[in-house]
Image (tube, rainbow, N blue to C red):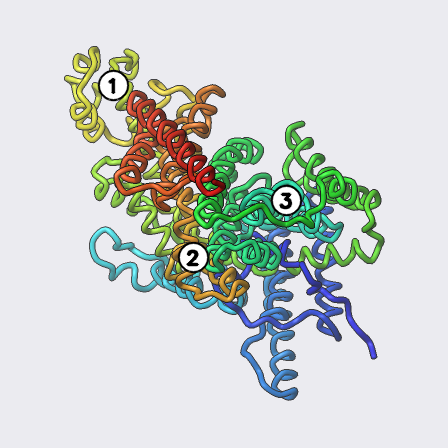
Amino acid sequence: MTTGPRLDPAGDDRTKAPEEAGEYEAYVRPFDHGIVGWIAWSVGIALALYHVWANTFGRFDQVWLTAIHFAGFAFLCALRYPLIRTHGPAATRAVLAFDVLFGLVAAGATIWLISNQGAIFARGVRLSPLDIALSVVVVASAIELTRRATGIIIPILIVVSLTYVFWWGPMAPGVFRFAGLTFETLMFRSIFSDDGMFGSIALISATFVFLFIIFGAFLVRSGAGEFIIDLARAIAGRFIGGPGYVAVMSSGLTGTISGSAVANTVSTGVITIPLMKRAGFPPRFAAGVEAAASTGGGLMPPIMGAGAFVMATYTQISYLEIVAVAFLPALVYFLSVAFFVRIQAKKLNLVASDPDAPTAWQVLKRGGPSFLIPIGVLIGLLVAGYTPTYAAGFAIASCIVASWLTPNPMGPRAILDALALGAQNMIMTAVLLVSVGLVVNVIAMTGIGNTFSLMINAWSGNSLFIALSLIALASLVLGMGLPVTASYIVLATLSAPALHALIQNNALVDAMVAGTVPEMARATFMLADPAAMMALAAPMTRDAAWALLEATPPELLSVVYPQVLDPTTIKLALLSAHMIIFWLSQDSNVTPPVCLTAFAAAAIAKTPPMATGIVSWKVAKGLYLMPILFAYTAFLGGPPLEVATIFVIAVIAVYALGAAIEGHMEAPLNWPVRILLFAAGVALIWPNTPVVEVIGGIGVIAIFIWNLRQDRARQRAAKA
C-alpha cells in the first residue's frame, strides 16, 4: 500500500499562516495519505520553491507572480476545503473529483486570462466575450474558495461590493449613491487594477507573507517550537504563578515565528493550560490567559502577521521601522497579561511550581541554535538594509544549517516537508488576500472610502477619542465575521485617512494654540480666511483654531501640513493611524460574542466558551490602552528618552488598572483603594497632562508600597 507524505504532523499548528481559518471552523480534507497527499505535497513544494526563487534571485512581472500565486493556491484550496461534507466513500470520491476539476478550472482560467493581457491592452483594454467569461470564472472561484475556507461573511461582502458598482449603486440614497460602471469595466479593474485581485495586496501575499510563513515552517521543523516552550519553562517555571508566565513568554516567542492567535493558542496552549491548571489556576482563567497571550503573538515582531506587511505597503514606511517601533508596545501588552497572572497567583496564594523545568543552559545547549541563529540572521539582514523577502530567504537557509547543530538536523526529506508545510499553512491566507482585493478595488474606484472618512469626521466632531471609539466599535463588528488581516485591510481602507487627518490636525491645532505657525503657512491659511494672517500671528484659542481648520479646504491643508509640521510628525501621524487600527483589529480574538481564540483555549481547558471569552477580554485590556497612547503620544516615533518614559508610564498604568479591576496587588484591596488606584491608572494615560501623570505615578507607587507591607505583615502573622 502506498502512503503519501504527512502534511499534518503533530505540532504544525505553530506555523499556521497569519490568517488561518481561525474565524470559521472549515471542514478540512486531510493531506495525510494517498494520492491527494502526494499531489498536495508536490504542488506545495513547487509553489514554495518558485516563490523563494522569485523573491530572492529571480525577476518577475507582478501580474504573473500574483496570478501563479493564486492559481497554485486555488488548486490547493479546492483540495484542502471540500465543496460539502460527505458521508460514504462514493460521495467522497465524487466530491473529490469535482474539487480537483474545480481547482484546475480556476487555475487554468487565471493563467489563460493573464497570458492574454497583451491582446487585451492592444484592443484598448476591451475584453472579448471569452475574456469576460474567464474573468467571471476567476472572480467566482475566488468567492467560492473564500467561502469554503473562511465562511460566508467575506463572500457576501465581496458580492455586495461588486454589485454596488454596476447594479444597486445608482439606486443607493444620499452620499452612498454611485453613478455606476459597466460590467466589463468592473471585470477588467477587478483583474488588472493595482487595487484588484492581482494588485498590491496579492503581491504582499506572494512576497512578504508567504516567505515568512515558509520561514516559520522551517523553524518549527527544525525544533524551534519545542525550544520556545522549554525556554519559557526554564526562565519562568519556578516562580510563583510560573506556568502563567510560561504561557505569556511562550506565546510571545511563538508570535515571533507565527503571528497567528489561534495557531498560537492551540500549539502552546496544549502545554501551558494543563500546567496552569496543575499549579492551581482556575481552568477558565488559564484558558483566558492563554487566549490573551496568544493574541499578542500577532503584535510581536518580527512577523506580526500579514497585517504588518500590508501596513508597510499602505504607509510606504519600511517594514523594519514598523517592527522596530512595535516592540515596546507589544512588550507592554505582554507585561499587562503577566500582571494579571501575578495578581491572580497572589490572590490564590499559589506557590512556586514546575520543579521539573529544565535549566536555561540545558535548553539553550539543546535547541538554542535552531531558533536564535535564524532569528539573528533575519534581524541582521533587515538592519543591514536588505529587503524583508531577501532576508527571509536567507533566514530559511540558515534554519537548515542551524538545525545541524542540534539533535534534530534537517535532511532532504525534512526540507521538502517544511516547504510543503509552509505552502499548506499559506492556503487560506493566499486565497483570502487575493479575494479581499476585490473589496479594496471597489472602495478605491467608487470613492466610498472618502465618504466613510467624511462620516467619521462628522460623527466625531473633531474629537480624536470619539473617532477612536467609533473605529474600535467598527473593528469589533467587522471582527465578528472577518479574520484579523481582512478586518484590518477593510477598516484601514475606509477609516485610516480620517484618523490620520485627525491626528495631524491635533498636532496642527497645538501649533496654532502655541502661536508657532510659520509665516508661509499663515499666508496659505489666508486663502481660506483673509483674517487668518493676523489671527495666527499670536496664540489662538483651541476653539478658534479648530474653526479655522474646518473652514480650510483639504487641498489647502495638504499644503499647510508640511509647512507647519516636521516630516517626522507627519510620518508618525500616518503610522499611528494604521497601528491603532491594526491593534484594534486584534480585539475580535478575545471579545465576545465572537472570539475564536478564546474558544480554542476553552476547548483545551474544557471550560464554557463564552465565559472564557469574558475572562480573556478582561485580561487583554492592553489592546485598548495602547491605541490611546499611539493617538496622543509619540510612543511610536519620539526621541528615545520620551519613548522610554512613555513605556514606563504605560507599564505602571496597566498594572494599576489590572490591580484595580482584580481588587488585589500583593494583598487584597478594599473598594476605596481600588477606586483611587483606578483613578491613578487613568491619570497615567490621560493625554498631555504631565502634572496629572506624575501625581498618578506617585499614587500607584505609594499604594503598591503600602500593599506590599500589608502582604508581608500577613505572611508574618501566618507563620506566627
Q: Which residue is mark 1?
A: 512
Question: How many marks can you see?
Answer: 3
Describe residue 373's horizontal placement relative to residue 600 as left or right: right
Q: Which residue is mark 2?
A: 185
Describe residue 620's horizontal placement relative to residue 516 as left or right: right
Residue shown at 72%/52% (left/top)?
A: 50
Q: CA distance from mark 3 to mark 1?
A: 50 Å
The residue sitting at the front extreme is 720
Q: CA distance from mark 3 to mark 2?
A: 55 Å
Task: Say which quadrant the N terminus sits in.
Answer: bottom right
Q: Earlier in the sequence, mark 3 or mark 2?
A: 2
Considering only vertical position in the picture, is 81 above or below 469? below
Q: Quadrant of residue 661?
A: top left
Check disc 3 and give the amino acid type: Ala
**On residue 484, which mark appears?**
none
295 or 637: nearer the viewer:
295
Q: Earlier in the sequence, mark 3 or mark 1?
A: 3
Q: 10 Å neighbourhood of mark 2: few (<14), some, or many (≥20)? A: some
Residue shown at 66%/34% (left/top)?
A: 379
Q: Secondary structure at mark 3?
A: helix
Check disc 2 and give the amino acid type: Thr
Image spot of residue 426 (x, y percent): 62, 56
Q: Nearer the viewer, mark 3 or mark 2?
A: 3
Check disc 1 and give the amino acid type: Met
Task: Note whether residue 708 is visible.
Answer: yes
Residue shown at 54%/42% (left/top)?
A: 309
Q: Which residue is mark 3?
A: 232
CB-based contact (under 8 Å), mark 3 and mark 2: no
Q: Quadrant of residue 630?
A: top left
Task: Note whether residue 207 is visible.
Answer: no
Q: Nearer the viewer, mark 3 or mark 1?
A: 3
